[in-house]
Amino acid sequence: MSFSFIVSRLRAAGCVFAEEEARLLAEAARDPGALARLVERRAAGEPLEHVLGWARFRGLRVLVDPGVFVPRPRTEFLAEQAIAVAPRRAAVVVDLCCGSGALGAALVAALEEVELHAADIDPAAVACARRNLPGAGVYEGDLYDPLPAGLRGRVDVLLANVPYVPTGEIPLLPVEARLHEARVALDGGRDGLEVLRRVAAGAGRWLAPGGRLLFETSERQASHAVEAIARYGLWPRVTHSSGWDATVVIATRPA
């Protein structure tokens, strides 16, 4: 199977960056037969990251198993905001809805002496995150439920990359997401904010005084997200990156 054939096959399947993807697939394959199987998986619409088994995130190679939510490039903006507000040393960080653990891994790489805990309701995501976050506490369960009680009132940075796609808009998502990622990682309920409201309701009990909750949302949902956060006694502010096309809300527990 020639390189030009692979590129043509991927282009015919609608892959915009066919040449780059062809190089990555060729590097990942052990032999020609394995390469042919990888190319066909990608041409059939499976996300490149699932085919390769990893995704790039803030310069890191994050393992991503089939079915697990793929870290989005725009979420690097959320990681940057969290790094900017975290204590430089001995930060206590919790990553809710952690997926592959990409956000937690980014903070561990950028900060010193991080005490990291992560949780997800999806067993496949938890298994993946445990491989990406050696030494961290990674728990399976619904939001705060599986976290150690000793974390209450100690968390400096609470990351919650909650699902925020309204249920009615799930059919409009790209096929890669709809067919190959867990729905629980995408569906934010009727208005896309149902999981966020649950996170906001419990955040004050887990955050240290002055601690921050950070989450990603869409620009059109931001004002409603701010209302939901403020209702639970947190002080929210919105920051946006046009370069990443990303909107992040940072909410502080009053000191």
Image (cartoon, rainbow, N blue to C red):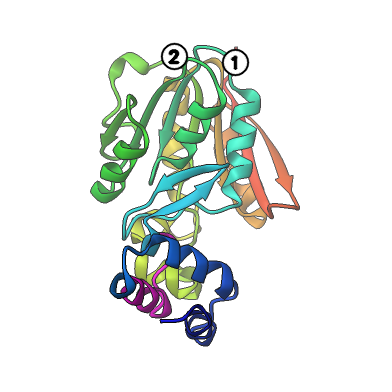
Report the front residue among 86 and 110. Answer: 110
- The quadrant of the picture occupied by the C terminus is top right
Q: Is residue 193 left or right of residue 129?
A: right
Q: Residue at x 52, y 29 (%)?
A: 109
The answer to whether one can see residue 48 in this image is no
Report the front residue among 232 and 212. Answer: 212
The dot on residue 109 is: none
Q: Main secondary structure of the magenta part?
A: helix
The dot on residue 154 is: 2
Q: Is residue 160 above or below residue 73?
A: above
Q: Is residue 30 above or below residue 203?
A: below
> What's the distance in space between the residues labelled 2 and 1, CA to CA?
16 Å
Report the front residue among 78 and 184. Answer: 78
Give the residues drawn in magenta, as a range.
35-49
Q: Is residue 138 left or right of residue 193?
A: left
The residue where tag 1 is placed is 88
Q: Is residue 176 above or below residue 95?
A: below
Helix, strand, or loop for circle 1?
loop
**Magenta segment includes 41:** yes
Looking at the rendered image, the disc whose residue lies closer to the viewer, 2 or 1, is 1
Return the x and y of residue 135 as percentages of the image width and height. 32, 24
Return the x and y of residue 113 as percentages of the image width and height. 47, 15
